């Protein structure tokens, strides 16, 4: 069984309600929804870091509608192939828990810097552990996970390699160059073509597998179009003009282009056959 570490002193936390505590008497309350906040003040970059409750609710609505179900299917296929006997999975940057809730493992852990996202995740899936924490300082011992996921989230290769078992895998999911091109054409007056590294080299890892998933989808109604915006980092940098243009959009056909990169801490040729 995996036991998280105290973010203050690094000692093992005893997971008992109503609070988790370590031998140095640092204590962290278990919220009513079941998650625990292990994000210390020194690890925050703002008073309320990460996605807001409005953004998280919009993401939940979009994902629950099934538009990204092909991503879930591909994720299950990749994990089953490269980690068929995985007992422990960490979703680093789990958001509201959609992807992790669709994977099977005896121990599933999700962390996110957004307290609101983790709260939604804890409501979605009761049979997983949810923490408010940062991927830059994972509150776990070395070598405890079979799989680490980063679903459109930050990659902290040193931390991910540290918490993975010797034969563990890291699954990185990125947006491709043409991902959501219709949405971007509405909210930006001109589209700048920036070169994007889709299969980065990561220290401590070997790239075992790469694949692209492409599919089209169609949205009806201004609310669902707005929900799509909150699935993206564009929500943080959209201009007033772009926001108004999107508010006037009630129907949208778009294209998803998703990159799956599977990394191993060492060569795993037997899984590639």
Image (spheres, rainbow, N blue to C red):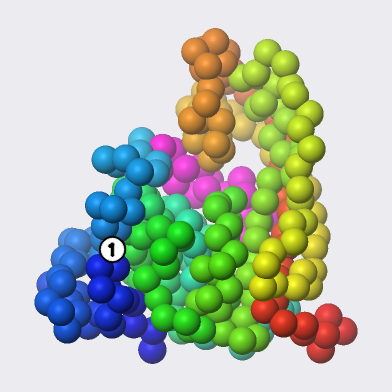
When the figure is inspected, residue 13 is found, relative to residue 68, above or below; the finding is below
Q: Give residue 269's position: percent from left, percent from top.
A: 83, 85
Residue drawn at the location 30% of the way across and 76% of the way down: 10
Q: Give residue 128's position: percent from left, percent from top.
A: 38, 72
Residue drawn at the location 58% of the way across and 73% of the way down: 161
> Which is more toward the observer, 4 or 257?
4
Q: Give residue 236's position: percent from left, percent from top.
A: 49, 30
Whether residue 115 appears in magenta in the rendering, the answer is: no
Q: Say which quadrant the N terminus sits in.
A: bottom left
Would you say 166 lies left or right of 216 here? Answer: left
When the figure is inspected, residue 185 is found, relative to residue 164, above or below; the finding is above
Q: Give residue 113's position: percent from left, percent from top.
A: 38, 52
Whether residue 56 appears in magenta in the rendering, the answer is: yes
When the figure is inspected, residue 237 is found, relative to residue 256, above or below; the finding is above
Q: Which residues are magenta?
A: 55-80
Instruction: Report crowding for label 1: few under 14, some 14 to 19, many 20 or more residues within 10 A (C-alpha).
Output: many
Would you say 26 lies left or right of 121 here? Answer: left
Q: Which residue is mark 1?
A: 38
Q: Say which quadrant the C terminus sits in.
A: bottom right
When the figure is inspected, residue 100 is found, relative to residue 252, above or below; the finding is below
Residue drawn at the location 42% of the way across and 67% of the way down: 138
> Which is more toward the observer, 110 or 144?
144
């Amino acid at each position: 069984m995996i036991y998280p570490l105290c973010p203050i002193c690094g000692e093992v936390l005893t997971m008992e309600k109503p609070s988790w505590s370590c031998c140095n008497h640092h204590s962290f309350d278990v919220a009513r929804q079941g998650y625990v906040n292990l994000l210390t003040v020194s690890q925050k970059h703002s008073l309320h870091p990460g996605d807001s409750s409005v953004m998280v609710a919009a993401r939940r609505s979009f994902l629950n509608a099934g538009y990204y179900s092909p991503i879930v299917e591909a994720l299950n296929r990749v994990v089953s192939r490269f980690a068929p006997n995985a007992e422990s999975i960490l979703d680093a940057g789990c958001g509201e828990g959609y992807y992790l809730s669709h994977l099977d493992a005896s121990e599933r852990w999700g962390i996110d810097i957004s307290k609101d996202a983790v709260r939604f995740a804890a409501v979605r899936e009761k049979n997983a552990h949810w923490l408010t924490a940062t991927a830059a300082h994972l509150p776990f011992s070395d070598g405890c996970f079979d799989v680490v996921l980063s679903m459109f989230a930050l990659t902290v290769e040193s931390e991910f390699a540290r918490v993975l078992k010797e034969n563990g895998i890291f699954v990185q999911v990125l947006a491709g160059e043409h991902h959501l091109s219709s949405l971007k054409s509405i909210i930006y007056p001109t589209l700048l073509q920036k070169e994007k590294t889709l299969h980065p080299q990561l220290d401590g890892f070997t790239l075992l597998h790469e694949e692209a998933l492409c599919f089209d989808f169609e949205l009806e109604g201004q609310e669902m179009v707005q929900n799509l915006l909150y699935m993206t980092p564009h929500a943080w940098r959209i201009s007033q003009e772009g926001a108004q243009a999107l508010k006037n959009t009630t129907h949208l056909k778009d294209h998803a282009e998703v990159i799956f990169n599977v990394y191993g801490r060492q060569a795993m040729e037997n899984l590639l056959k």
